[in-house]
Image (cartoon, grey):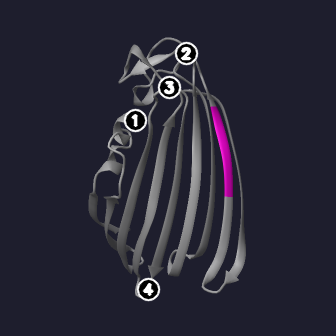
């Protein structure tokens, strides 16, 4: 979607080491105004430019420790509010009788990690996302995920990892409420990888 104007501001501060590492606090806020082409042509993601009016978002995080050394704890929260042009209808790339309402996507992510001196790192956490659309009988669905990750930095150039994301009670209609953009939250996912940097 073409953007007419946008802005973003952020601020952060890192306190000196406390017990096992520094404590960092960060805040951010941003937004955008979308162009209204009013021609019905589909843009990126098959969303016509005359559907979305604007959006605003904020995020805040607190972390303790160093991700690549010993214990690391972090939590982040964020929310995005999307405003839709009144009276617009859209579904799956074509106009029809289904109207899009304004909606908010809210999320929280927490992580705990430990990195050993030999380069092996173990990580897990918890993720929550809520899709809340305005209007009568509109969707208000939640997703819950537990990610698990193990990686080994064998040397400065070579790293291997295994990871998984487990559905931890995601609402059955969450994928439909997000137009399948976030369908991955409703199933378990596994991955194995390796990376060599020349």
Residue under label 3: 136
Residue under label 1: 177
Residue under label 2: 37
Left or right: residue 88 compared with residue 170: right
Question: Contact (CB < 8 A) between labels 4 and 2?
Answer: no
Residue at the spot 68% in from the left edge and 65% down from the top edge:
25
* Total numbered badges shown on the rendered structure: 4
Dot 4: within a 10 Å radius of its alpha carbon, few (fewer than 14), some, or many (20 or more) residues?
few
The image's mark for residue 116 is: 4
The first of marks 1 and 4 along the sequence is 4
Q: Nearer the viewer, mark 1 or mark 4?
A: 1
Residue 174 percent location from the top left of the image: 37, 41
Q: State the SS at label 3.
A: loop
Q: State the SS at label 2.
A: loop
Residue 88 percent location from the top left of the image: 50, 16
Left or right: residue 37 compared with residue 171: right
Question: Contact (CB < 8 A) between labels 1 and 3?
Answer: no
Q: Quadrant of residue 104?
A: top right
Q: Quadrant of residue 13?
A: bottom right
Residue 64 percent location from the top left of the image: 60, 74
Residue at the spot 32% in from the left edge and 66% down from the top edge:
163
Spatial separation of the CA atoms under disc 4 and disc 3: 52 Å
Q: State the SS at label 4.
A: loop
Left or right: residue 28 compared with residue 84: right
| Segment tinted magenta in the rendering | 27-32
The first of marks 1 and 2 along the sequence is 2
Spatial separation of the CA atoms under disc 1 and disc 3: 14 Å
Residue at the spot 26% in from the left edge and 61% down from the top edge:
190
Q: Nearer the viewer, mark 1 or mark 2?
A: 1
Dot 3: within a 10 Å radius of its alpha carbon, few (fewer than 14), some, or many (20 or more) residues?
few
């Amino acid at each position: 979607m073409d953007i007419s104007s946008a802005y973003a501001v952020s601020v952060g501060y890192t306190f000196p080491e406390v017990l096992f590492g520094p404590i960092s606090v960060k805040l951010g806020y941003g937004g955008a105004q979308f162009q209204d082409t009013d021609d019905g042509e589909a843009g990126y993601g098959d969303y016509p430019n005359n559907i979305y009016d604007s959006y605003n978002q904020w995020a805040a995080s607190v972390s303790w420790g160093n991700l690549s050394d010993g214990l690391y704890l972090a939590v982040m929260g964020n929310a995005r509010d999307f405003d839709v042009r009144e009276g617009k209808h859209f579904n799956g790339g074509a106009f029809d009788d289904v109207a899009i309402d304004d909606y908010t996507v809210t999320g929280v992510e927490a992580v705990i990690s430990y990195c050993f001196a030999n380069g092996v790192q173990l990580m897990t956490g918890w993720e929550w996302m809520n899709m809340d659309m305005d209007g009568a009988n509109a969707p208000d669905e939640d997703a819950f995920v537990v990610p698990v990750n193990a990686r080994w930095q064998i040397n400065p150039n070579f790293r291997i990892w295994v990871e998984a994301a487990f559905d931890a009670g995601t609402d059955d209609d969450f994928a439909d409420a997000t137009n399948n953009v976030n369908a991955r939250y409703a199933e378990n996912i596994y991955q194995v990888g390796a990376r060599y940097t020349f």
